[in-house]
Image (tube, helix red, strand yellow):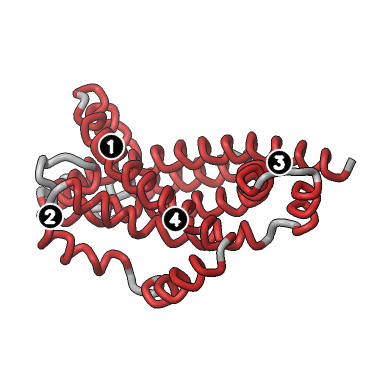
Amino acid sequence: MPRASLAFLIGLLVLWQWLASSGLLPRYLTSPAVIAREFALLLQTGELFQHSAVSLYRSLAGLALGAGLGIGIGLAAGTSRRVAGFFEPLVSLTYPVPKVALLPILLVWFGISDTSKILLIAVSCFYPCYIAALYGVRAVDPIWIWASQNMGASPRQVFFKVIVPAAGVHIFGGLRVSLALAFILMVASELIGSSNRLGLGFLIINADAGGRFDIMFAAIVAIAILGFAADRLLLGLRKRWLAGYAVMEESAHA
């Protein structure tokens, strides 16, 4: 994290602590010191690990399903006009619909289960990955494709050795958007309820109902930490991918 961002965050926490200690904030805005103490206690008892593990499973399973389908269909649509002609009207029609509006339907079909939450996340993650993969393929320099074909590359080799690596820059952009959506929809779906009474969203709504605002903010902090760590991991993978892409680009221009 840049020093300026870290300094701003620390300053904000200090101001929050001072306002809370002075009694200038309402009771539901618990001080950072109390939140930190409850966070440490939840870690010590292992309760926070249980809720975090369940939430991570739901969000990452939904992300994997939605992103896998989105990237796969997007790559196919980018290389085939017939596939694009079939999917593009459907995507244009359904993309503006808020995906959380599907939650009541999924709850009727699958109940308050992991399945309904994972499917909601998967649907939300599908669209950014589909669009990123589609336009990633369309952004590939045609000269690269012609050059590889003239060198005797098969259609399969052109797809996996040229198109997919070049489209990876856009794909990772779609994945980053989808990762954020996965966490947002995970919390939104868990706020409705949880069949096993686990999950950070369930912990938040349960703590709010009991007036335990320290636990509520501790769960929010856990979501922020998990989301930040997942985003940094994805950016690290993107950096490695771009390093390989840069090598491939240099070889093409050599």
Identify the residue position indicated by label 2 in the image.
110
Q: Which mark is residue 245?
A: 3
- Specify which label sits upstream in the sequence, 4 or 2: 4
Disc 4 and disc 2: Cα gap in Å?
Answer: 23 Å
Judged left or right of residue 34, residue 75 is: right
Disc 1 and disc 4: Cα gap in Å?
Answer: 43 Å
As shown in the figure, which amino acid type bears the numbered disc 4?
Gly
Disc 2 and disc 3: Cα gap in Å?
Answer: 42 Å
User: From the image, which quarter does the C terminus lie in?
Assistant: top right
Residue drawn at 33 percent across, 38 percent down: 222
User: Residue 164 versus residue 27: which sits nearer the camera?
Assistant: 164
Disc 3 and disc 4: Cα gap in Å?
Answer: 22 Å
Disc 2 and disc 1: Cα gap in Å?
Answer: 38 Å
Identify the residue position indicated by label 4 in the image.
70
Residue drawn at 56 percent across, 48 percent down: 172
Q: Are marks 1 and 4 in contact (CB under 8 Å)?
A: no
Q: Can residue 235 be seen in this view?
A: yes
As shown in the figure, which amino acid type bears the numbered disc 1?
Val
Q: Can residue 4 be seen in this view?
A: no
Disc 3, SS: helix
Q: In this view, does 84 lie above or below 60?
A: below
Q: How many marks?
A: 4
User: Where is residue 102 shown, x and y percent of the image?
Assistant: 24, 66
Judged left or right of residue 78, residue 102 is: left
Identify the residue position indicated by label 1 in the image.
34
Q: Marks 1 and 3: which is nearer the front?
A: 3
- Specify which label sits upstream in the sequence, 3 or 4: 4
